[in-house]
Amino acid sequence: MADLRAALGHALEPLYRVEREVRPIGSCRMFVALGRTDGVGLLVKVLPGALSLAIDSSRFEQRVRRLTEQLGHPDLVAPRGAGRAGSCVYHTRPFVEGTTLRAWLARHGELPLRRAVGILRDVLTGLAHAHATGVAHGDLKPENILLADGQALVADAGIVGAVVDSTTGNAGDAATAALCTADYLAPERRAGERAPGPRDDVFAVGVLAHEMLTGRPPTQDAEALETVRSVPSWLGELARRCCAPDPGARWADASAALAHGTWPTGGI
């Protein structure tokens, strides 16, 4: 651990100093760094060692820089940069004070309807911008949704695609296995389709809707949201189409799903 922290400190100098390690997400270790002049926080996410060795770090840095240009939107936390620290590849984004949707669900279970709908609205709005610029998230899950200042923010959009594009051979499959959570992957991704697309993100949105409103992800024999008391019919239909096993039966992208909804105004 000390060796990795020291390598990160060297890679981020002279602009940042590594402040602390925080709870990991999956197999990725995470650190908070602070700007030496302004004290502004930066989250540093370190990819697993075996995956890092398969990545062309120069190509990955280029792909992440492109994502930074594409993902400027109030509902997205755009990546800040990427690099290599010792043998490990990392990427960075602004550190957001708040909590993740995963942490909220772990503490409280299902969300009140209005808050769940507000989160879905913000997530779909951010994804609609990403999809319009040609970026699929590829790893949408509660850990990558940040709740802060009455808003839901989508983080790490496009990172899986950048990793896959920066590897060769079967390493792209290893990237999906290392970075993604199976519950939120569309069937075609679980079957080995290499590149994520907008319909994969739409599937994950449907899983999120079910989990926020029932406290658990859907299973094959799970009760459809249309039959859950207090869930409006339009929301049940939206979730059902999002989770369709056939990609062609889903909404084509986040913008199409967003157009179907009756969304509240104001914060979450």
Image (spheres, helix red, strand yellow):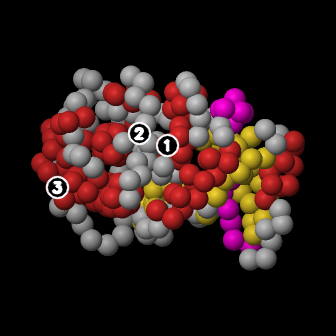
Helix, strand or loop at disc 3? helix
Q: How far, Cα to Cα, is label 2 from label 1?
A: 7 Å
Label 3 with label 1: CB-CB less than 8 Å: no
Q: Earlier in the sequence, mark 3 or mark 1?
A: 1
Q: Is residue 253 magenta?
A: no
Q: Which mark is residue 260?
A: 3
Q: Where does residue 164 sit, x and y in percent of width and height? A: 53, 37
Helix, strand or loop at disc 2? loop
Q: Residues within 10 Å of mark 2 (few under 14, many from 20)?
A: many
Q: Residue furthest bottom?
A: 38
Q: Earlier in the sequence, mark 2 or mark 1?
A: 1
Q: Residue at x 71, y 33 (%)?
A: 53
Q: Is residue 100 left or right of residue 21?
A: left
In terms of image quadrants, where is residue 36? bottom right
User: Where does the magenta region start and end?
Assistant: 39-54
Helix, strand or loop at disc 1? helix
Q: Is residue 241 left or right of residue 33?
A: left
The residue labelled by disc 1 is: 161
Q: Is residue 91 visible?
A: no
Q: Residue at x 79, y 68 (%)?
A: 15
Q: Nearer the viewer, mark 3 or mark 1?
A: 1
Q: Quadrant of the N terminus?
A: top right
In-front residue for pair 32/250: 250
Q: How far, Cα to Cα, is label 3 from label 1?
A: 27 Å
The answer to whether residue 176 is above or below residue 123 is above
Q: Which mark is residue 196?
A: 2
Q: Where does residue 194 sit, x and y in percent of width and height? A: 44, 31
Q: Is residue 168 visible?
A: yes
Label 2 with label 1: CB-CB less than 8 Å: yes
Q: Earlier in the sequence, mark 3 or mark 2?
A: 2
